[in-house]
Amino acid sequence: MTFLEKQKTVIFIGPQGSGKGTQIERLDRVLREQDPTRRVVDIQTGRRFRAMAASGEGYTEKHIQETLDTGILQPLFLSTVLWGDSMRTHVDPDCHLLIDGFPRIVDEAKVLESAFSFYQRRSIDIIHLKAPEAVVRERMVSRARPDDTVESIEERLRWYREETSPVVEYYRARPNTKVHDIDGTVSIDEVHSAILKALDLPKN
């Protein structure tokens, strides 16, 4: 008998620098502690793209490395291959599923629907981390990651504004879906508490 009555499917959406990676890791720990008999699957495509680029094995990997430094959105087919293969090897109808890095555009959200249907996941929670561009711009500069150049940061912000923001509205209209707007400018602990409250999880 697990602590939670049913599995959770949670998608994190927010601009780079809004704290998605930190918060998904904290939620992962909470679910493992509160529901120890159920697996938690955490799929983050950004991390997988960086790992692929670091291998430098062939044209695909080398080209990804070049484009990571520009902030250009990676092609839909590669993103779908990465998260699709992760789901194929790790996801089942009973596990908790945490998603970061996709869907990035509405078309990708529509592709993801087929996976949700296959793995029998009707109810979806969206953690929408909201933070002004000035805030996330400063955070990305301060973390000093090699691909966080001034040009790439501005390109990512533009992409998020024009292409990813509509994904949030797509999910607002989706049946059996709750979009939780969370202030991403407050402290890490405050954001974490707000996420637990939104998902009806006890504070750890």
Image (spheres, rainbow, N blue to C red):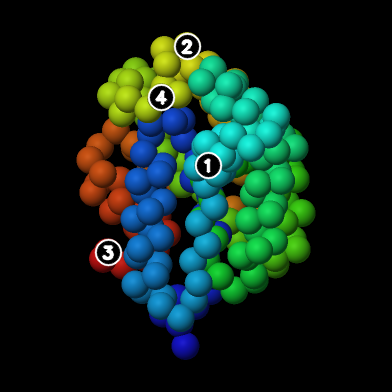
Q: Nearer the viewer, mark 2 or mark 3?
A: 2
Residue type, label 3: Lys
Question: Would residue 173 be visible to someone looking at this image?
Answer: no
Kindly indicate the quadrant of the structure image that contains residue 109: top right
Q: Are marks 4 and 3 in contact (CB under 8 Å)?
A: no
What is the x, y in percent for residue 149?
A: 42, 16
Identify the residue shown where x is 34% and y is 55%. Answer: 26
Q: Earlier in the sequence, mark 2 or mark 1?
A: 1
Question: Would residue 18 be visible to someone looking at this image?
Answer: yes
Residue type, label 4: Pro
Q: Is residue 87 above or below residue 142?
A: below
Q: Which residue is mark 1?
A: 51
Residue type, label 1: Ala
Around disc 2, counting alpha carbons within 10 Å, would you say few (fewer than 14), some (14 to 19), or many (20 or more)?
few
Residue type, label 2: Glu
For numbered disc 4, what is the local secondary structure?
A: loop
Q: Nearer the viewer, mark 1 or mark 3?
A: 1
Q: CA distance from mark 2 to mark 1?
A: 22 Å
Q: Which residue is mark 2?
A: 151
Q: Which residue is mark 4?
A: 146
What is the x, y in percent for residue 15?
A: 46, 30
Image position of 148 (left or right of 63):
left
For numbered disc 1, what is the local secondary structure?
A: helix
What is the x, y in percent for residue 172?
A: 59, 42
Q: CA distance from mark 4 to mark 2?
A: 12 Å
Q: Earlier in the sequence, mark 4 or mark 3?
A: 4
Kindly indicate the quadrant of the structure image that contains residue 176: bottom right
Kindly indicate the quadrant of the structure image that contains residue 4: bottom left
Identify the residue shown where x is 32% and y is 25%. Answer: 144
Q: Which residue is mark 3?
A: 203
Around disc 1, counting alpha carbons within 10 Å, would you say few (fewer than 14), some (14 to 19), or many (20 or more)?
few
